[in-house]
Amino acid sequence: MNLKNKLRWIMAIVTTFLFAVAVGQSAKASTIDNSYALSSNQGSSLRTSNNVIIAHATAVYAPAKNVAIYENREWSNTTAYVQYVVGDGGKIYRVGAEGYQAWGAGSWANANAPVQIELAQTYDQVEFRKDYVTYVNLLHSSAIKYGIPTDVDSSAWRGVKSHLWITNNVWGDHTDPYGYLASHGITKAQFAHDVKYGFSSSGNNVNPTPTPTPKPSKPTNKKAVHVTYALHQKGKKWLNPVKDFSSGSNGFAGVPNSAHDMLYIKVNRGSIKYRVHTKEDGWLPWISKGNKKDTINGVAGIKGHTIDGVQMYYTTPHGETYQQAYYRSQTTQRTGYLGTCADNGSVSGYDSWAGMLGEPLDRLQIHINDSSEY
């Protein structure tokens, strides 16, 4: 082998090594399963601008393989698919083509995202860890590949963006992937750190389930915060307001097995903003006042439109012990309360909004504290 060819050989090895490092062992090209990839004459033929990488979660507890199969089969009927689905213990399934528009988060997001990635949901913590490392590394390496900042959900219009960021800043009603990540102990801050820097090839440079920072046993400046709220029964009238929550029929807002169309919430300290999701309209705008007589600015909801989701965020007065809105709901189609929520997903281990889309919300409980009382 002459010197020139030897140098080429060495450079090829170095280039391959650097690429493997960039994508991480969990996101190597050799691990991508192309069995369910759309063919060249399927999906969108429009190229993307390279401004954002979008992080999703599937919202269903199903194998990633099944999600990929479904998107491959139904992409034309549902007008929904992404480039990659991650799951099943760290596997990557390709559906759409990189650099071409997928249909995952609305027209702006689709046009600006060369890569959108779904994280399949599992209850298995061991499987989740493998999935999470792969997911993070694929987000990180995709951003680097397309010259996109690895910062997550920054105020800039370029970077790695959650579907929640797209909802809050562009369009939509999705809040993923934060609710699912929180169910496995991953905070927004942890996720942002991990995506920014990526995992080493072993996946062990950061612990995906960090030990929470202990709270003071005796908060030094905790103030009692009371929340008053009421639901309007669809087709009927405003129900009596509820203060905080208790047991029995007066311990929640709403009427069992009945639909509701409007909600107001107010607090005696600090401030709270809230919004509702209706079956007819999706997520409606945030409301920061609580006045049933002001159906424009003081009430969330539209008369006659069925509420199936609620989200809120409490702001603690400066200098006081940090507190949050903890809340939960039931629906007309299920027995028992759904999972407890904390603000809009800011607390590890709690859901980011209450309700079940498509199922009328029939009762709601809220309290404000530095920890959940449910």
Image (cartoon, rainbow, N blue to C red):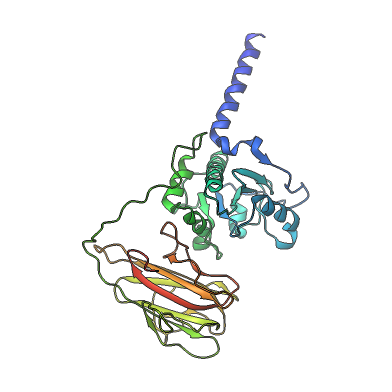
For this rendering, which residue is in front, 162 or 106? 162
Farthest-out residue, right: 41
Q: Is residue 374 visible?
A: yes
Give the residue at x 46% y 45%: 208
Give the residue at x 31% y 53%: 214
Check the image and report above or below for 277 versus 351: below
Check the image and report above or below for 259 versus 343: below
Q: Is residue 98 visible?
A: no
Give the residue at x 60% y 27%: 16
Horizontal side of 67 relative to 156 (left or right) equals right
Check the image and report above or below for 90 versus 177: above
Residue 162: x and y in percent read: 52, 54
Farthest-out residue, top: 2
Residue 117: x and y in percent read: 60, 50
For this rendering, which residue is in front, 22 or 209? 209
Check the image and report above or below for 224 versus 177: below
Horizontal side of 341 relative to 98 (left or right) equals left
Horizontal side of 226 relative to 42 (left or right) equals left
Quarter of the figure with residue 121: bottom right
Residue 319: x and y in percent read: 24, 62
For this rendering, which residue is in front, 20 or 349? 349
Horizontal side of 58 relative to 316 (left or right) equals right
Quadrant showing the N terminus:
top right
Quadrant showing the C terminus:
bottom left
